[in-house]
Image (spheres, helix red, strand yellow):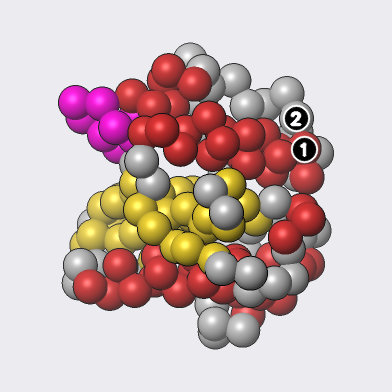
Amino acid sequence: MNIIIRKAAATDCPQMLELVKELARYEKAPNEVTVSLSEFIDAGFGIAPVWEAFVAEIDGYIVGISLFYIRYSTWKGRRLYLEDIVVTESMRGKGIGKLLFDETWALCKDRNYSGMVWQVLAWNEPAINFYKKYGATFDGEWMNVSLDG
């Protein structure tokens, strides 16, 4: 199995969005993905892109993604925010998530950001155990807050 980890291209977006939808189903929120393909492409590859991504590819098919962007902390400075890391269900347990995570972490360090942050659902034990292997810190104090427009 030849796994290629590379930066995402606009032509990858349809397959990437399918993985996002697969993640939403896994997280028991299949109807929460409302972004259109055109918005997704524009947000990553338009005139003012707001996200970047790595993809894991096997035989021309995308089996995993790491989608991230830069956030700013008034306490810590620039930090990479890992929005989603997804490996398609049939390919989990083969080290693809580790390859994507390692590539994302390496980019964070190469750019001299102060760290990487992300969220994980409290019930997602496989993901929590994965992140613990890296020595990640879990903060139970902060609550998620959002406004939908």
Position of 75 relative to 49 (above/below): below
Please name the amino acid that badge 2 sits on: Pro
State which quadrant residue 94 falls in: bottom right
Q: Secondary structure at mark 1?
A: helix
Which region is colored magenta? 43-50
Question: Observer-nearest residue: 108 or 96?
Answer: 96
Report the residue marked by disc 2: 30
Predominant SS along the magenta part: loop
Q: Specify the quadrant of the image occupied by residue 10.
A: top left
* Label 2 CA crowd tier, 10 Å (few <14, some 14–19, many 20+): some
- Residue 83 lies, with reference to residue 132, above or below; the image says above
User: Is there any visible trace of residue 148 in the rendered image?
Assistant: no
Calculate the distance from the C-alpha at mark 1 to the C-alpha at mark 2: 4 Å
Tag 1: residue type?
Arg
Q: Are marks 1 and 2 in contact (CB under 8 Å)?
A: yes
Which one is in front, 56 or 137? 56
Provide the residue designation for mark 1: 25
Q: Is residue 139 above or below residue 25?
A: below
Q: Residue at x 52, y 57 (%)?
A: 56
Give how far across and how far down residue 98 sits, in percent.
56, 73
Q: Position of residue 48 (x, y in %)?
A: 21, 29
Residue 31 percent location from the top left of the image: 73, 23
